[in-house]
Image (spheres, rainbow, N blue to C red):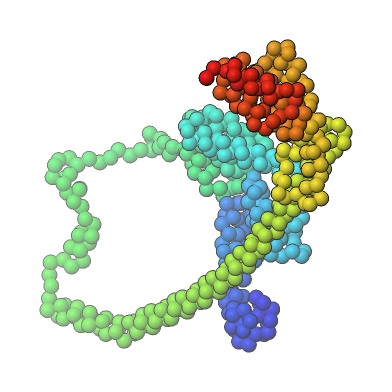
């Protein structure tokens, strides 16, 4: 025979390749199909709640039942649970890649971007309403839920929560409307049925006065006590046995009891014993089959978990490599953008673009481009900031002059022809602001590094002598 699980030839019930009991496997598959048929009938009758229960039961027995998964996804979709529907269809598509309608469902949902955005928005509003309900803010929850239902009219969970919110504010009319909408979508929804019983509770019909019979009350205390203590079995006992017993009657009674026990011992008790033994045997067989089934199920799940763990590890490695490649390409692209800025004369923009680079990740070619941009654009931008800062200093706009000169100082180096002027002006601005410690640092930097620039070393020494000690 052929193993129904791995399709390899098997001898006997136990497959030598996968270790599955073929008879037990076939029984599990048939049980799953039976639950699928029940779920299908419930779905056709618009009893979506029962359909979900039946289909989940079928999938708990055979998770590879793609027909049940596809139908469960359609039922979820009909209830407005788009994410759950997509999950079931994607699992089904992975289990059966070929000739599976789940792929069509997924493609159709992905093509309709507006539907996906609407489902996401309605779910977000539903979650916000849940938080408002927890905070006893029913009015705000109702606003969110109305909007969610407008976006997704079949969102059963949102309609049920809307009914609960209306019941919380004692608005049974609007609650009834929401409940009826749910039952029109899912006639077997347990939550909606519960709310329906609360809203549409009816009082028993009143009995017309003309048909009522007056109660017969006891005339005195003794009659009332006898009425309370009335025992019909006691009356029957007195009438049956009366007050006279004879010896032949007693002997006949005893012989009859003995015959009854003998009859039970010979015929009835052995039959009962055999019945119990058969029941015990049947239960032992069912227990054995259940153990075999769950052992096979555990085996399948363990194999699936190992395979899924390996697949996840592989996907994580691929993702890490993809992200690293993407980061490297973006880094290289940013270096090329800085080079384009430099070639267009936008030297400040070129340096600003270089500041956002991850230099250690650059290839040797791009590293050369990086150093070339630095060497070319830095002196130009430094000179631009210096000229701007000197003009502002001469105009006694010390605040903006300091900002421009600090930018120039960041780009300056020891051989820069403007270095002495840049730090001298910064020292003068710090001296003007009363920050003598900072001014001393600037003047001392000019002297220590012998910065170039029209006797700025002597001017810096004069500045040091001028500062208070």
Q: Nearer the viewer, residue 462 or 201?
A: 462
Is 387 left, or right, of 41 in this rendering?
right
Q: Quadrant of residue 34?
A: bottom right
Task: Tell me residue 438's x, y (percent).
Answer: 59, 24
Task: Tell me residue 195's x, y (percent).
Answer: 50, 40
In the rendered view, would you say 265 is above or below 179?
below
Extreme residue toward the top, this view: 395
| Residue 266 visible to the viewer | yes
In the rendered view, would you say 88 is above or below 449?
below
Q: Nearer the viewer, residue 192 or 20?
A: 20
Extreme residue toward the right, this view: 344
In the rendered view, would you say 39 is above or below 197?
below
Q: Nearer the viewer, residue 277 or 215?
A: 277
Is 369 left, or right, of 222 in this rendering?
right
Task: Tell me residue 27's x, y (percent).
Answer: 59, 74
Task: Tell me residue 57's x, y (percent).
Answer: 56, 62
**Which residue is at 69% across, 14% downward?**
397
Q: Nearer the viewer, residue 41 or 267?
A: 41
**Which residue is at 48% across, 78% downward?**
288
Is 106 left, or right, of 215 in this rendering?
right
**Which residue is at 52% across, 36% downward?**
131
Is 232 left, or right, of 162 in this rendering?
left
| Residue 411 visible to the viewer | no
Quadrant holding the N terminus = bottom right
Count of numbered circles in the view: 0
**Which residue is at 17% across, 44% downward?**
224
């Amino acid at each position: 025979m052929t193993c129904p699980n791995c399709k390899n030839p098997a001898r006997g019930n136990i497959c030598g390749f996968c270790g599955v009991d073929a008879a037990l496997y076939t029984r599990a598959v048939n049980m799953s199909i039976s639950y699928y048929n029940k779920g299908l009938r419930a779905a056709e009758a618009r009893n979506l709640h029962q359909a979900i229960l039946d289909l989940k039961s079928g999938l708990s027995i055979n998770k590879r039942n793609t027909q049940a998964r596809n139908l469960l996804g359609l039922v979820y979709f009909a209830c407005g649970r788009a994410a759950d529907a997509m999950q079931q269809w994607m699992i089904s598509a992975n289990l059966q890649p070929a000739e599976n309608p789940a792929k069509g469902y997924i493609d159709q949902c992905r093509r309709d971007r507006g539907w996906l955005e609407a489902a996401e928005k309605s779910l977000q509003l539903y979650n916000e309403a849940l938080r408002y309900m927890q905070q006893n803010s029913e009015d705000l929850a109702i606003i969110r839920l109305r909007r969610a239902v407008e976006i997704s009219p079949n969102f059963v969970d949102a309609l049920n929560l809307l009914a609960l919110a209306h019941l919380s504010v004692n608005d049974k009319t609007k609650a009834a409307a929401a409940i009826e909408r749910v039952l029109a979508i899912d006639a077997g929804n347990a939550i909606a049925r519960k709310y329906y019983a609360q809203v549409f509770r009816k009082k028993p019909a009143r009995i017309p006065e003309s048909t009522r019979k007056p109660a017969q009350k006891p005339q005195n205390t003794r009659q009332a006590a006898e009425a309370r203590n009335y025992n019909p079995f006691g009356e029957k006992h007195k009438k049956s046995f009366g007050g006279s017993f004879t010896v032949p009657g007693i002997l006949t009674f005893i012989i009859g009891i003995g015959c009854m026990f003998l009859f039970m011992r010979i015929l009835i008790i052995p039959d009962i014993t055999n019945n119990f033994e058969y029941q015990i045997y049947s239960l032992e067989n069912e227990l054995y089959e259940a153990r075999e089934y769950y052992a096979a199920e555990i085996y399948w799940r363990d194999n699936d978990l190992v395979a899924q763990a390996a697949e996840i590890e592989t996907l994580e490695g691929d993702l890490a490599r993809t992200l690293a490649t993407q980061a490297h390409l973006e880094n290289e692209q940013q270096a090329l953008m800085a080079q384009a800025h430099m070639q267009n004369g936008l030297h400040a923009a070129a340096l600003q673009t270089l500041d956002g680079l991850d230099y250690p990740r650059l290839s040797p070619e791009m590293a050369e481009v990086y150093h070339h941009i630095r060497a070319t654009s830095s002196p130009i931008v430094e000179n631009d900031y210096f000229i701007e800062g000197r003009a502002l200093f001469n105009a006694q706009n010390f605040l903006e002059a300091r900002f421009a000169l600090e930018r120039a100082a960041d780009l300056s180096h020891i051989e820069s022809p403007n270095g002495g002027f840049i730090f001298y002006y910064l020292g003068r601005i710090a001296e003007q602001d009363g920050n003598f410690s900072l001014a001393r640092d600037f003047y001392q930097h000019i002297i220590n590094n012998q910065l170039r620039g029209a006797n700025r070393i002597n001017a810096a020494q004069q500045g040091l002598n001028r500062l208070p000690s």
